[in-house]
Amino acid sequence: MAHTAAKARGFSLLELIIVLGLVSAILGVVLSSLLEGDRVSLLGRQESEMHQQLRDVLTLMVKELRRAGLPPRNAYDGHYLRSSGRLNLVSSGILAESHPGMLAFTGDINDDNRVDYVEYAVSGATPPLTLTRRAGPIGDAGTLPDSPAQALSHLVESCRFSYFDASGNLTSRAADAASVRIDLTLRSQAADLPSGRHRTLSRSVHVKPYNP
């Protein structure tokens, strides 16, 4: 009878505390593993996004920049050709207002016999910066396109345009440029733990327009 009564009284308080402690420890390990798995998965997705954006942005920039310069003569109407100022604007290809943070050029970028204006610019005071593109055909009166800028990436750590003359020397005069080097670095949205640093991905391309 005494043995049966001992069985009926159940677990002691100490035993319950020990069991609860073990269960909490196991749940903590499981939860920590799940959170770590989510973090690794997030970083993997962000790195994949950086690779994709870097490839897409540079492919577009190289493709368009190679078309910078004087398009075929039939790309201009009579009024446009009679204006030497406008003709010079187009024939210069890479424009003088370009600088390390902005690249502006003209040319028949989509091969439709129309003169296009293209502008790539970086904005923002501190990273992440935003890289934008504005493009469109130049009007018959020489007006630049008024289309809004399109954001290409909000993950920019740094973006710099460097200009080289026909002899391959670095030049500060973009209007003299025969080629352009683009140095682009993207960064992850979230920082790694515990370092607090963002992952970065960089690439440089050197482009010589077909029609400088």
Image: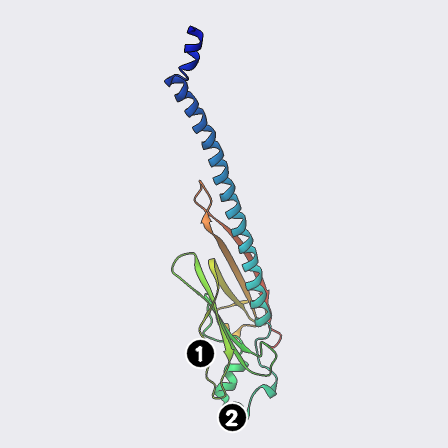
Residue density around tag 2, few if under 14, some if 14–19, many if 20 or more, within 10 Å: few
Residue density around tag 1, few if under 14, some if 14–19, many if 20 or more, within 10 Å: few
Residue 79's tag is 2
Front tag of 1 and 2: 1
In this view, 92 is above or below 165: below
Q: What residue type is labelled 2?
A: His
Q: What residue type is labelled 1?
A: Asp
**Coordinates of residue 83 in the picture (x, y in percent):** 49, 90
Task: Say which element carries label 2.
Answer: helix
Direction from residue 210 to residue 161 in the image, left or right: left
**Coordinates of residue 205 in the picture (x, y in percent):** 58, 62
Q: In which quarter of the image is the N terminus?
A: top left
Residue 12's tag is none
Q: Which of 56 and 120 is in front in this view?
A: 56
**Coordinates of residue 87 in the picture (x, y in percent):** 52, 86
Residue 146's tag is 1
Direction from residue 205 to residue 124 in the image, left or right: left
**Coordinates of residue 92 in the picture (x, y in percent):** 53, 79
How many numbered discs, if any? 2
Q: Quadrant of residue 97?
A: bottom left
Direction from residue 15 to residue 111 in the image, left or right: right
Q: Which of 52 and 6 is in front in this view?
A: 6
Q: Quadrant of the C terminus?
A: bottom right
Q: Which of 182 and 143 is in front in this view?
A: 143
Task: Say which element carries label 1.
Answer: loop
Residue furthest top as drawn: 2
Q: Which residue is drawn at 50% across and 39% down?
A: 34
